[in-house]
Structures are given as C-alpha cells and as structure tokens.
Image (cartoon, rainbow, N blue to C red):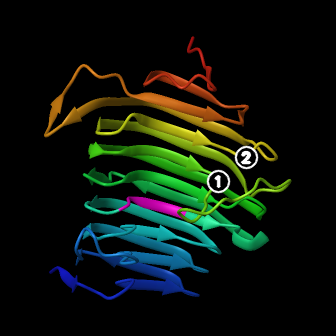
Amino acid sequence: MFKFSVDSRKWHISIERSSSVHASNLNIKAPEDSPNTDGIHIQHSTNVTISSSTIKTGDDCIGIGDGSKYININRILCGPGHGISIGSLGENGRRETVEYVTVRRASFYTTGNGVRIKTWQGGHEYARHIRFEHISFSRVIRPIIIDQYSCPPYQHCKNYSTAVEVSNILYNDLRGTTSGEIAVELSCSESGPCKNIRMKDIQLDYGINGKIYDGHPKSHCLSVVQSWDEGNVYPNVPCLTKKLSY
C-alpha cells in the first residue's frame, strides 16, 4: 500500500537524529516550480533505508545532510526535481560528514540533476564511501555532478584554503540521456582535490523525448586525483586514468 504526501509547504519527510529507519512504497508529489519541497531529507541519522518509492518535487527528491551514515536508497523513481543530493556540506566553515551511502536502481526523469555531491568552500571533514549503481536517466540536465563550489545565486563566493574532502566515490552502470551540454561534471576544490573517484560502464547520450540525437555531451574536470575509469565510459572524462583489465 502506497503512502501519499502531496503539496507540502516545505520538506515532505524529515528523518533526523534517528537510527534503523526503513521507509518504502512512498508516493510524494509537489509542483515542479515549488521551492524547498524536498521529498525526503536525512540528517544526523544512521542505518536508513528508502526503497520502492516515487518522488516528484520542485527540489531534491532525496537530500542527505550532515551526520548521515549507512544510508541505502533503492528503486526510486525521481522526477521532476533536483535529483538525489548529498549536501550541501561545510557552509560557513562547518565540520560536516556523510559516509557509507549507496544509491541503487534509481530512475531519473526530466530532473535538473541526477546524482549530486555538493559542498561549500571553506568547510571541513568529508563525504566518502559513496556508491551510485545501476541508475538510468531520461532527459536529465546534469546526470553526474560533484560541485565543491556551492554558492547562492547572484552572489560572489571566494575560494578558501580548506574544503570538505570528497573521496572513494563509485559510479557503476549509469546510463541514459541528458538534455544538457555537460553530462559529467567533477568540479572539485583546488585546495583539497577529489580522490579515488571510480567510474565503470557509463553511457550518457544527448537525447530528448526518448530519442538519441547526434549531439555529443561533454564532461568537465577540475582538481581530481588518484581516480580511474573501467569499461566503457562515455562521454570521456579526461581526469580519470584508464584502468586496464587483463
């Protein structure tokens, strides 16, 4: 039996300072242009599982914030909305952590982002041990994104000498279409580069309304080290070293 949440004024469901939570068969809906209507927000919580749910909002389908650990997200249909986001972390120099997050068998339809990690300059601590696997995209503007330069619109945010460390991230079997120019964006901090980023079997084509067109989506890399790709990865991500199989 589905549990419904419709047109919440802000977050539909908030899981905070909790442990051993299992939520499934949710149907969450808000208008595409409604701000701050996250479907599910998780913070300061451990051992949380979200599964077999449909989330359509004007903001993140699922947002994972500070203090989240051992989070499992499985079989989520997301869209419209801003995708599944980790962060943002480290605003105003805060020490914030997220680790051991797994997102599997999610489908994204006409979302602004797909799977995203976002942090502020000047933050501390880490986002690490995160896995995105067996994920499909349809007309998603930015399917894969790490953004360590989170900044409010129309404001100028300066670079700092510290950053939340992003490391040990796996992208495995992510496929579908993008409606944007940059399908893979890894914008990491020059003061604390992303490391141990692994991509395996990625296929992101340019397409609208289910049709694949001849446009070639691109990737963007900044400050990524000790990282590699395996199998077929398209578009090519030049900051990753090809790992050879023997």
Res. 189 mark:
2
Which residue corresponds to the image point at 71% horizontal and 36% vertical from the top-left?
Answer: 223
> Disc 1 residue type?
Tyr
The quarter of the picture where residue 100 lies is: bottom right
Residue 113 location in percent, x, y?
40, 52
- Residue at mark 1: 149
Which residue corresponds to the image point at 67% horizontal and 44% vertical from the top-left?
Answer: 188
Q: Secondary structure at mark 1?
A: loop
The mark tally for this picture is 2
Q: CA distance from mark 2 to mark 1?
A: 7 Å
Instruction: Determine if the magenta segment contains residue 139.
Output: no
**Residue that protrudes farthest toward the top in the picture:** 246
Q: Are marks 2 and 1 in contact (CB under 8 Å)?
A: yes
Above or below, 28 relative to 176: below
Depth check, front residue: 232 or 9: 9
The quarter of the picture where residue 134 lies is: top left
Residue 215 location in percent, x, y?
29, 22
The magenta region covers 82-86
Depth check, front residue: 180 or 211: 180
Above or below, 242 relative to 21: above
Is 194 left or right of 77, judged from the image as shown? right
Res. 166 mark:
none
Which residue corresponds to the image point at 46% horizontal and 64% vertical from the top-left?
Answer: 72
The quarter of the picture where residue 78 lies is: bottom left
Is 238 left or right of 182, judged from the image as shown? right
* Quadrant into which the N terminus falls: bottom left
